[in-house]
Image (cartoon, rainbow, N blue to C red):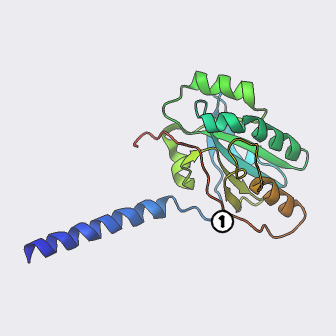
């Protein structure tokens, strides 16, 4: 009887832990993002609401060391440039505890024309449930999440058959329903403080 009780307690504890972890990181499509402020690579405080675009905003989780992000850098910059003129702004976020500010700053200056914010202690990665780089969150002008996941379906960029992010942008700008609001992001694991 004692063994059964221990087993039941263990099973309940595992489910409680799994549920708690999932609930903390379950920022679903349709949820509204609260305004937040982080420092950019120059140490200047920047808020989401100051940086957002009139037609939407993308938070893209980035890494200076991730080879998958390196394969995406050119595409990320091209998409950001293509849609900046249409009122959609990009904001980069680096949540990797293993990357120094100097490294992140030089990488951002070399690759991006949009601001990259430093998420010390991976607070915002945890709130949104971001797990990999690159991973994108596309919000409308009212800060409601419209799309979350991968940029497209091919890390190499040679065999893209689904441009998830561009399709979400185009549907939003045309006043249509976004057909695919979620996809599985892939890339390098965000290097967290506790994990």
Instruction: Pinpoint residue 21: horizontal percent, then vertical percent.
Output: 42, 59
Instruction: Pinpoint residue 120: horizontal percent, then vertical percent.
Output: 52, 37
In the image: residue 41, left or right of residue 25: right
In the image: residue 153, left or right of residue 20: right
Which element type, helix, strand or loop, lies under badge 1? loop
Q: Is residue 189 above or below residue 10?
A: above
Instruction: Pinpoint residue 107: horizontal percent, then vertical percent.
Output: 67, 26
Residue 42 visible in image: no
Number of marks: 1
Which residue is at the front of the view, 106 or 73?
Answer: 73
Q: Is residue 98 above or below residue 87?
A: above
In the image: residue 11, left or right of residue 182: left
Q: Quadrant of the N terminus?
A: bottom left
Q: Quadrant of residue 93?
A: top right
Q: Quadrant of the C terminus?
A: top left
Residue matched to label 1: 29
Q: Is residue 41 above or below residue 178?
A: above
Which residue is at the front of the view, 69 or 120?
Answer: 69
Which residue is at the front of the view, 77 or 186?
Answer: 186
Which residue appears farthest toward the bottom when viewing the image? 1
Which residue is at the front of the view, 184 or 85?
Answer: 184
Q: Quadrant of residue 79?
A: top right
Q: Say which residue appears at 47% left-offset and 64% top-offset.
A: 23
Q: Say which residue appears at 38% left-offset and 63% top-offset.
A: 18
Which residue appears farthest toward the front when viewing the image? 159
Q: Mark 1, residues whose alpha carbon is within 10 Å: few (<14), some, or many (≥20)?
A: some
Q: Say which residue appears at 40% left-offset and 42% top-offset.
A: 194
Residue 145 visible in image: yes
Which residue appears farthest toward the left when viewing the image? 1
Q: Say which residue appears at 51% left-offset and 58% top-offset.
A: 25
């Amino acid at each position: 009887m004692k063994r059964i009780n221990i087993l039941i307690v263990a099973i309940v504890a595992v489910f409680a832990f799994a549920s708690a972890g999932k609930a903390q990181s379950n920022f679903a499509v349709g949820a509204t993002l609260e305004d937040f402020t982080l420092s950019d690579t120059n140490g200047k405080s920047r808020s989401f609401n100051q940086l957002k675009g009139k037609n939407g905003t993308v938070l893209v989780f980035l890494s200076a060391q991730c080879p998958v992000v390196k394969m995406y850098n050119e595409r990320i910059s091209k998409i950001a440039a293509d849609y900046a003129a249409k009122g959609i702004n990009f904001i980069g976020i680096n949540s990797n505890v293993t990357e120094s500010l100097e490294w992140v700053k030089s990488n951002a200056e070399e690759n991006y024309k949009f601001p990259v914010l430093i998420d010390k202690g991976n607070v915002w990665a945890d709130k949104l449930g971001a797990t990999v780089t690159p991973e994108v969150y596309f919000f409308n002008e009212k800060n409601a999440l419209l799309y979350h996941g991968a940029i497209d379906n091919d890390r190499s960029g040679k065999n893209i058959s689904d441009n998830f992010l561009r399709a979400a942008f185009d549907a939003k700008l045309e006043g249509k329903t976004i057909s695919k609001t979620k996809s599985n992001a892939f890339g390098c694991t965000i290097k967290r403080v506790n994990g």
